[in-house]
Image (tube, rainbow, N blue to C red):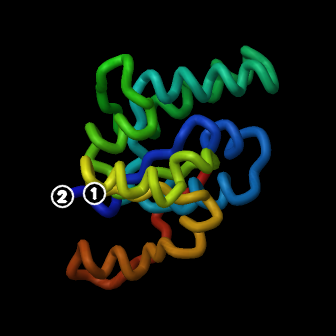
Amino acid sequence: MAEIARVVADSDVLAADLLVGGSAREALDVVRSHSWISLVASDPLLADARAVIAELASEELAAAWHETIESERSAVDHPPEDHPALASAYNGNAAHVLSFDDRLGSAKAGVTIRKRMETSVKSPDAFVTLFDPERLHETLFDEPYPGPDRSPR
């Protein structure tokens, strides 16, 4: 069973968080603001995001971002031919994948994904709308929700 406090952000969301903000940053701020929610990512997933950041901004910014994200993520391994975000979710037992890729978020893809693992692909907008850290905390812990317990940046 997938762990409901484990989240994967596809490379497009990781890059948008850094370079654009908006719903990608809002979604990842929710994750970063709670020590009990994990951002799951493989090395290939981070490499994809780093390449996008380097192409759109600079290699220096991409390297600095990569150094920071390495310590923030829960690392997982997967075969090199696998889709980095989906394989990170599968191997990291994550319940949520955030992506702007409409192909991953389609109903057809959802059915295929759910046959193999208990995860759902959502846009960052949908995640922000649907994900409720307080309700999730209540299902995982006996004590009341303390609110965010760390800075998102």
In the foreground, 34 or 79: 79
Q: Is residue 131 above or below residue 42?
A: below
Mark 2–mark 1 distance (CA, rounded to whole Å)? 6 Å
Residue located at (63% from left, 48% from top):
100
Please state the horizontal and vertical placement of residue 74, each as a whole percent of the image: 35, 39
Task: Determine the image quadrant of residue 55.
Answer: top right
In the foreground, 39 or 122: 122
Q: Is residue 150 above or below residue 138?
A: above
Which residue is tagged 2? 1
- Discs 2, 1 touching: Cβ within 8 Å: yes
Task: Determine the image quadrant of residue 53.
Answer: top right
Residue located at (61% from left, 40% from top):
14
Residue located at (35% from left, 50% from top):
112
Please state the horizontal and vertical placement of residue 2, each as a whole percent of the image: 25, 56
Q: Note whether residue 150 is visible.
A: no
Q: Earlier in the sequence, mark 2 or mark 1?
A: 2
In the foreground, 24 or 72: 24
